[in-house]
Amino acid sequence: MFERLADEDVCYLTTTGRKSGNAHEVEIWFGIQDGTLYLLSGGGDSADWVKNIKKSPAVKVRINSQTATGTARLLRRNTKEDAAARQLLDGKYMGWRPGKKLSSWARGARPLAIEI
């Protein structure tokens, strides 16, 4: 659904507040590969939106005027999917290319995937 919007700059992620139960929307960088949307949390596990996902993985994603619901999951570290997510977003936003070192942002961020 979102593949044609992969070149957009940002998406809007809505999570459910783990304490309040209210909807919380953040603007965030994203990448899409094989129908899965990937995000990197520069704040790691301490970011509020990541904490919200840990409690309730049901999310809403909006890119331009397209909106969909999905299920978010934290990626296991040092897996092929973890590396692919870091490379995807670092390539899109920081100019990473094969053979180059990932940016400090991509190396230190917490990767998540959203199945739409």
Image: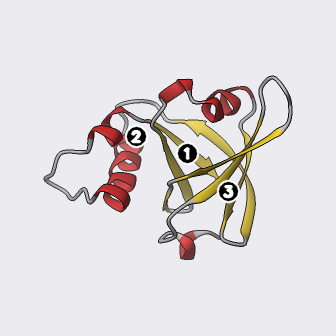
Q: Measuring 61% from the left and 32% from the top, which residue is drawn there? A: 50
**How is the model colour-coded?**
secondary structure
* First-in-chain label (3 vs 2): 2
Q: Looking at the rendered structure, which numbered label has been put on residue 82? A: 2
Please name whichever residue, 11 or 38, is drawn nearer the observer in this view of the structure: 11
Residue beneath disc 1: 113
* Image quadrant containing the C terminus: bottom right
Disc 2 is placed on an element classified as helix
Q: Is residue 109 above or below residue 9?
A: above
Amino acid at circle 2? Asp
Disc 1 is placed on an element classified as strand
Please name whichever residue, 107 or 115, is drawn nearer the observer in this view of the structure: 107
Considering every residue shown, the one lying at the far right of the view is: 21
* x, y percent for residue 54: 66, 27
Q: Measuring 51% from the left and 50% from the top, which residue is drawn there? A: 38
* First-in-chain label (2 vs 1): 2
Considering every residue shown, the one lying at the far left of the view is: 99
Considering every residue shown, the one lying at the far bottom of the view is: 4
Please name whichever residue, 8 or 56, is drawn nearer the observer in this view of the structure: 8
Amino acid at circle 3? Ile
Query: 78 left or right of 27?
Result: left
Q: Quadrant of residue 103?
A: top left
Measured in 3D between alpha carbons, the distance from the residue under mark 2 to the one under mark 1, in whole angstroms, is 9 Å
Measured in 3D between alpha carbons, the distance from the residue under mark 1 to the one under mark 3, in whole angstroms, is 10 Å
Query: 66 left or right of 99?
Result: right
Q: Is residue 52 above or below residue 112?
A: above
Amino acid at circle 1? Ala
Residue beneath disc 3: 116
